[in-house]
Amino acid sequence: MGNHHRAGGGGGGGGLRVAKGGVSKRAASSSSTPGGGGGARGDENSRAAYQGIQFLKSFGQHILKNPAIVNAIVEKGGVKSTDVVLEIGPGTGNLTTKLLDTCKKVIAVEFDPRMVLELRRRVQNDPVWNAKLEIIQGDFLKVDLPYFDVCVANVPYQISSPLIFKLLAHRPMFRSATLMFQREFAMRLVAPPGDPLYCRLSVNTQLLARTHHILKVGKNNFRPPPKVDSSVVRIEPRHPGIPVNFKEWDGLVRFCFGRKNKTLGGIFRTKNVLELLTNNFRTYKALQVVPDKKANKKAKADAMDVDDDADGDGADGASSAVVKQLIEDVLATDGFVDMRSSKMSQDDFLRLLATFNSKGIHFA
């Protein structure tokens, strides 16, 4: 694929910088003799990049081998010659080398030291590739990310959800991320209201970014083949972002999608939800800061009264009755009582959250 023939033989990594720790001699030995078996390094140099390495299912290692899919991902990712590209889990470098031919710089984050060694080996004899590649060895979820313009990745399925939200929390904001996931997870990301796959993941991701399905990738395009097909999704962070407290938002969405096919009336009238929202109501009221001294004393007295209620009647006390009525007031607004989370749009959830907050009910 691309200029794959430029990948060189064994030896050092030239000018390549490896951040967050190098590759130990033990790791190097493991990579050159997978599984503890024999075999000269020179023999490995004549093999394809994915040969001679035992892929680990525990790391979700499935190497994309189809050059047409690699080319499509880079093209659909909109990678420019001036871009700094973040690649997560580069593996043996099939996608990396295509990116190196296309962009200004690639920052590759790789957990497995054997793959780091293989990637170094693959680029070492090409001075252009070598100068443009930086490797950060470590756990993507724990490393500090540098500046990048776009992200491209074949994502290990175990970290799919936290990976997305770490990316979307990164500042400064990047332009786009073109990511490959297991197909069902990918379709959840892009699912619209009313779709059977529409869920909390859909709502939270689409609050922070626009999501687009790019292409389906069959499992036979990987070595070793996974059990299921994959899909490539393009994620574009919203500029500017929607002005909402994400913790509040996620708290509400958790309630709503606990039973997504029930009506909001059925969800928010349950005993457990009433107890939780009553506790939040008490806490929020107790933590309110009022600048005026007289008003502050009154607020503290009110908070003590609320605590007395909690010690006495619990969820059946005065504050519980107040919260119950406030919930009914919210449900009576804009027909919320009969809405179902599985069919609600972003605007519906935003209006619902704003209405709850206006009544003093909070979810964080």
Image: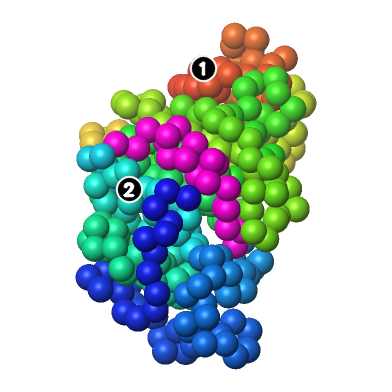
Q: Is residue 77 visible?
A: yes
Q: Is residue 275 left or right of residue 104?
A: right
Q: Nearer the viewer, residue 3 or 61?
A: 3
**Amino acid found under the numbered disc labelled 1:** Asp
Residue 157 magenta-highlighted: no
- Compared to residue 4, the image places residue 317 above or below, namely above
Residue at the far top in the pictured view: 334
* Picture residue at 64% right of the left edge, 48% below the top: 221
Query: Mark 2 sits on what residue?
Result: 101
**Residue 216 appears in which quarter of the rendering?**
top right
Q: Residues within 10 Å of mark 1 (few under 14, many from 20)?
A: few
What amino acid is found at the position of numbered circle 2 in the picture? Asp
Q: Position of residue 235 (x, y in %)?
A: 46, 34
Q: Earlier in the sequence, mark 1 or mark 2?
A: 2
Q: Is residue 225 left or right of residue 176?
A: right
Alpha carbon of mark 1 to alpha carbon of mark 2: how far? 42 Å
**Which label is found at residue 13?**
none
- Is residue 33 toward the left or the right of residue 275 in the image? left
Q: Position of residue 44 (x, y in %)?
A: 52, 77
Instruction: Please check the rendered image and state whether residue 78 is part of the magenta-colored stretch, yes or no.
Output: yes
Q: What residue is disc 1 on?
A: 347
Tell me, what colour scheme is on the image? rainbow
- Specify start and end residues of the magenta stretch as a single range: 61-80
